[in-house]
Amino acid sequence: MEGLISLKSSPGTSLRSFPSFNQPPNSFARRFSMDLPLRRSSFPAIRAQQPGTISPKEEEEEDALKVKEWEVGMFQNEVAASQGIRIRRRPPTGPPLHYVGPFEFRLQNDGNTPRDILEEIVWHKDTEVSQMKERKPLATLKKFIENAPPTRDFVGALKAAHSRTGLPGLIAEVKKASPSRGILREDFDPVEIARAYEKGGAACLSVLTDEKFFKCPLLCKEFVIDAWQIYYARIKGADAILLIAAVLPDLDIRYMVKICKMLGLAALVEVHDEREMDRVLGIEGIELIGINNRNLETFEVDISNTKKLLEGERGQLICQKDIIVVGESGLFTPDHVGYVQEAGVKAVLVGESIVKQSDPGKGITGLFGRDISL
Ligand SMILES: O=C(O)c1ccccc1NCC(=O)[C@H](O)[C@H](O)COP(=O)(O)O
């Protein structure tokens, strides 16, 4: 699965070959009719496994909301915009990334050109997922899942690390490069780095999900835009998956969280500002919230963002709901870790500061100011 490690455009493929090229925008109707059953009664598996997570009244309200959205024919971008989401989904004409021959080109305009890196990533992901779904339809993935080994307890591993060390449980990120920082490590051996993290005391790993060599539970760090990706991550060995509130409307998050539960995956729901935090706190069944200190549209990093989002009523609600908060991005020193811990996080997700070290395991000791493997 392509993730943060390989955020490159696919090699010169013509937009004509993309199956979704001529399809209408990703309306809820089209997407849910393809990926997920709509009606309440068509969710027996989810309901059977999740007794009591949602009251009948809430279910009715949820269904009414869905039907309403279908009736008024709201497209996903409109629903998303109404929730303050600035990221738009890929338009049917797609981004003008590929030109076919010297004489064919498309005029760029605001509607068919991504506004920022996150939007570009999401649009690219849309074409990539469409292609992958053609090769491996959902029905095929479901058959694999029937025989897949059980998932490891991602949230449990973070809690255990926190109680063992008194420090935030570490999700150590294996990444070669990032859009904001470029190449982080030339001699990139993901298996070796992950082993060093494990030895250095990481509770969990954030990594591409096609490797199965580690005891630590794995977070599939992806730009999830389609439920298909969750099934795919599960068969590739993920124990948890990232859902980004800046990209996904509430309804998508709700359904995706349910799918994660059904598949035994933890969902790390990532927020960056107060509005996203409030949206996510309004969704039932969320166990893990990541506060990203990096603005994914501007790349600005500010670790005081974690503190800001955990102050006052939001922090109290998070405690009441027993949600584990993960402080993400821009953590380089024991002071940084102490600062976000003081703000209320019980786990941290760290990439750059440890992946760049010649011994990433020792990088963890440097980050926490002591050996956390003991
Ligand atoms: O890191 C980026 O440049 C980036 C750009 C666009 C979308 C996501 C991006 N990064 C994801 C992350 O937030 C970080 O990989 C993760 O939180 C670790 O951050 P750090 O410790 O600062 O490497």
Image (spheres, rainbow, N blue to C red):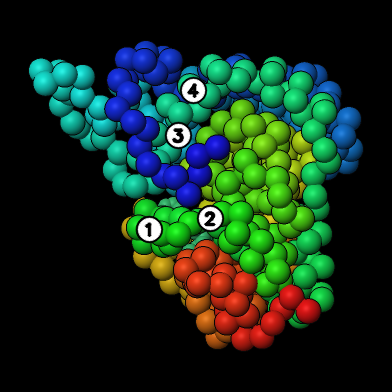
Quadrant of the rendered structure where residue 374 is? bottom right
> Is residue 164 placed above or below 150 in the rendered structure?
below
Circle nearer the N terminus (1, 3): 3
Q: Nearer the viewer, mark 1 or mark 3?
A: 1
From the top left corner, tell me how far across and down residue 288 is, in percent.
69, 56
Marks 1 and 2 sit apart, C-alpha to C-alpha, by: 13 Å
Marks 1 and 3 sit apart, C-alpha to C-alpha, by: 21 Å
Mark 1 belongs to which amino acid?
A: Ile
The answer to whether mark 4 is within 8 Å of ligand 1 is: no
Mark 4 belongs to which amino acid?
A: Ser
Pointer 1 residue: 183
> Quick check: marks 1 and 3 in contact, CB under 8 Å?
no
Residue 284 in sight in this render: no
Which residue is drawn at the image coordinates 56% and 31% (left, top)? 226
> Is residue 252 placed above or below 153 in the rendered structure?
above
From the top left corner, tell me how far across and down residue 82 is, in percent.
46, 40
Pointer 4 residue: 130
Which residue is drawn at the image coordinates 57% and 70% (left, top)? 360
Left or right? Give the position of 164 relative to 25: right
